[in-house]
Image: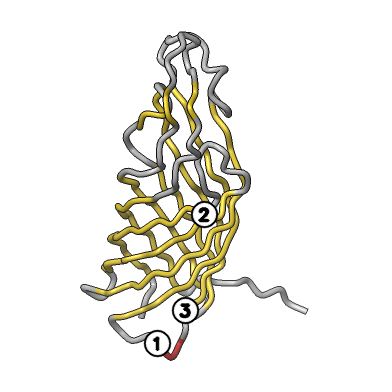
Amino acid sequence: MPVQLVHAQEVGAYLGFGSAYATSNGSQIDTFGDGTLYRSPHLTGLFMQLGANVFFNKQVGVGAEMSWRPSEGNYAGLLYRPSFYSFDAIFRPARATTKRFEPEFRAGIGGARVRFDFNDQGSCDQVPGCPDTTHFHVHLGGATRIYLKDHVFLRPAIDVHYVNNFFEFGSNWVPQFSVGFGYSFGRE
């Protein structure tokens, strides 16, 4: 019996910009041991997003996605940078797909990372998770590819990350909104 290889019907990549949000956990931290209390922040700011996918037929594919905050934020007197990555299964409903419009639904698993930078300010022992933590997370997303040309698309997306034990912030649920541009190879 001959072995058949699975061939990709379509390969695509995109770069996006958007924002993610999680509430503050409300803690006050004496970060530097000098009696000054710093409040933990909300997770906000501009996030960049980079993704790639492979479709095995017109409806089913797999993808990987990374989003990160390109600038550091202030977390209780320290600088921090959050990021999310996921590996997803992707489904495109055939009935809603046209030549210029392709909705997609994603579900997958990955990680959320919070990296702290304390810039020779001593120790960061007072801040939970410092110098960095990685949490398991579940990713759900919905996006629409709006094709501007045969292979070039605009991609507005809504993503939700459920981050297990996201103690640095006040919620395990992190919604993310983005708009990206991409290119698709092998699309008919």
- Marks 3/1: CA–CA distance: 8 Å
Q: Quadrant of residue 181?
A: bottom left
Residue 131's label in the rendered image is none
The three-letter amino acid code for the residue at tag 1 is Ala
At numbered mark 1, what does the secondary structure look like: helix, strand or loop? helix
Residue for badge 3: 92
Residue for badge 1: 96
Q: Give the x, y percent position of residue 71.
A: 32, 34
Label 2 crowd bin: few (<14), some (14–19), many (20+), radius 10 Å: some
Residue for badge 2: 173
- Marks 2/1: CA–CA distance: 28 Å
The three-letter amino acid code for the residue at tag 3 is Arg
Q: Nearer the viewer, mark 2 or mark 1?
A: 2
Given residues 120 and 99, the one toward you in this image is 120
Quadrant where the N terminus sits is bottom right
**Along the polypeptide, which appears first: circle 2 or circle 3?**
3
The answer to whether the residues at label 3 and label 1 have Cβ atoms under 8 Å apart is yes
The three-letter amino acid code for the residue at tag 2 is Trp
Q: Is residue 10 above or below residue 82?
A: below
Residue at 43 percent of width and 91 percent of height = 95
- Marks 2/3: CA–CA distance: 25 Å
